[in-house]
Amino acid sequence: MASGRNGTLYTGVTNDLIRRVEEHKRKIISGFTSEHDVNELVYYETHEDINSAIAREKRLKKWNRIWKLRLIEEMNPAWCDLYEELVEAVEKGID
């Protein structure tokens, strides 16, 4: 998640991405994302099991900023907020 193009970045793991992004957008839980206005879903990955998701999150958190920016721009060069697209895909059963 990001505060905007090249803005503050946040990496996390969840078992319900839509719910968790909505919480960030609505600032339901106080903390880093609400303090830094990080509310745009600019990149995400899916994993078959929680252990691989957590391992990936830990690796990404160790990456330097330039690597993270490159990863985002490979999937989402315009830095669009992917939340609505994700919601629509899940509603259509495409996820």
Image (tube, helix red, strand yellow):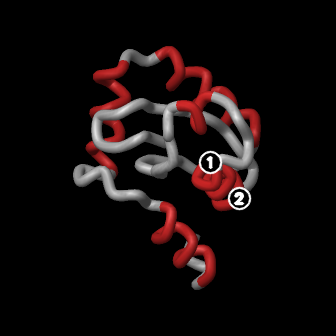
Residue shown at the point (71%, 58%) measured from the top left:
19
Left or right for 20, reference 85: right
Specify whether 66 is left or right of 28. left
Amino acid at the residue labelled 1: His
Vertical relation: 76 (above or below) 93: above
Q: Residue at x 52, y 67 (%)?
A: 86
Question: Quarter of the image containing the C terminus?
Answer: bottom right
The residues bearing labels 2 and 1 have C-alpha atoms spaced at a distance of 9 Å
Q: Which of marks 2 and 1 is in front?
A: 1
Establish if 28 lies above or below 94.
Answer: above
The x, y position of residue 16, in whole percent, is 72, 55
Q: Which of 67 and 31 is in front in this view?
A: 31
SS for callout 2? helix
Q: What residue type is disc 2 on? A: Arg
Q: Which residue is labeled 1 in the image?
A: 24
**The residue positioned farthest toward the left in the image shown:** 77
Q: Which residue is drawn at 50% across and 40% down?
A: 38
Looking at the image, the residue that sits furthest to the bottom is 92
Sequence-wise, the earlier of marks 2 and 1 is 2
Q: Residue at x 65, y 27 (%)?
A: 55
Q: What is the crowding at mark 1: few (fewer than 14 residues within 10 Å), some, or many (at least 20)?
A: many
Q: What element carries label 1?
A: helix
Is 35 placed above or below 84 here?
above
Q: Where in the figure is residue 11, as x and y percent of width and height?
A: 55, 33
In this orientation, which residue lies closer to the viewer: 70 or 55? 70
Q: Specify few, some or many for label 2: CA neighbours under 10 Å numbering under 14, 14-19, or 20 or more.
A: few
Q: Position of residue 47 (x, y in %)?
A: 63, 47
Foreground: 8 or 87?
8
The disc placed on residue 59 is none
- How many discs mark residues in the rendered view? 2
Residue 58, image x, y percentages = 61, 22
Residue wearing tag 2: 19
